[in-house]
Amino acid sequence: MHTTSHSSALPKMDEQQFAQWSDLLEEKTGMRLPDNRMSFLVTNLGMRMRKLGIGDYQQYYDHIQSGQNGKVEWDQLIHHLTVHETRFMRHAGTLALIEKMCLPQKTAPNSAKPLTINVWSVGCSTGEEPYSIAMAIDCHLVKLRYEYYLGIIASDISRSALAVGRKGIYPERRLKNMRPSWKDIYFDKLGEDRYQVTRELRQRVCFNHVNILDIGKTPIGNMGIIVCQNLLIYYDKSRRQNIVNSLVDYLAPGGMLILAVGEMLNWSHPDMERITFPNTLAYRHK
């Protein structure tokens, strides 16, 4: 196979090629690339094509469609096309909502049984969101002296992102908004610039490969909290509706569905009621 250099320019992508790649992405993930994202597509295809020494979009397209090697390469590409910069404590309003509206507010009575809390982080990327939620819940309940069981399912379409989440190792810049005490409690310093989420916290988060198109077949149920943020923006309006309606089926009665502000306008569901809380878009299962 001919190897192209890192500096070599890729051929110009025409509209037909862009449409071909957009259709493939939509067919496999449900995401539709707007026309103004051609340069984004070219950049990310280019990264993988240079690595493989492929200089032609059609050749790369055929490679991705063929056999086991193609499946492995698709996983690599999808990571570049769908995983975006994320960080710990990205949505402070969400964590505050979980602490105030989903957890007890008073010290545990002597007779208190251990609590069971089930959370699903949908589109978890490299794990910062589910770990932030785990820290917020642990910090709150330890303060109130509750014993509890916490299970967090963290799902994403990118296997590469999930692998990062499972290891729980991050550069220091990803921790920049972290409460200082949390950095000490929930991370082990590995070196000059690297931190790893403690083993105890990692054991509470289970990373699963889930394609949102198959969400109706996902064997998950009775979640107390579902968080789906910064994912719906990649889908058209009708698909957003379908995804959110499907998520409702996975909530336990009284469970909370938390979306990103502005991602779902005028959505309503007979089993859900809107919860008003600053800087959040949240619904409770009736």
Image (cartoon, rainbow, N blue to C red):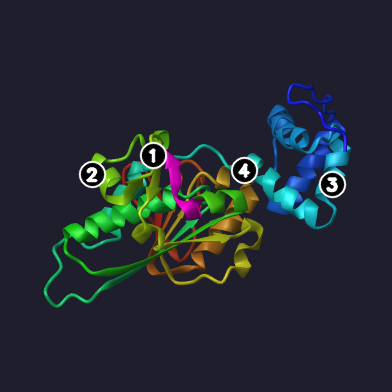
Secondary structure at numbered mark 3: helix
Quarter of the rendering containing residue 178: top left
Q: Locate residue 100, reporting x and y percent.
A: 25, 54
Q: Amino acid at mark 1?
A: Gly
- Disc with the residue nearer the chain's start (2 vs 3): 3
Quarter of the rendering containing residue 272: bottom left
- Disc with the residue nearer the chain's start (4 vs 2): 4
Viewer-nearest of discs 4 and 1: 1
How crowded pointer 4 is (Cα within 10 Å; few <14, some 14-19, many 20+) is rated as some
Quadrant the N terminus occupies = top right
39 displayed left or right of 119: right
Q: Decide whether residue 167 is among the magenta residues.
A: yes
Viewer-nearest of discs 2 and 1: 1
Question: Foreground: 266 or 218?
Answer: 218
Quadrant the C terminus occupies = bottom left
- Disc with the residue nearer the chain's start (4 vs 3): 3
Q: CA distance from mark 2 to mark 3?
A: 48 Å
Q: Which residue is mark 3?
A: 63
Q: Amino acid at mark 3?
A: His
Tag of residue 191? 1
- Disc with the residue nearer the chain's start (4 vs 1): 4
Q: Amino acid at mark 2?
A: Ser
Tag of residue 82? 4
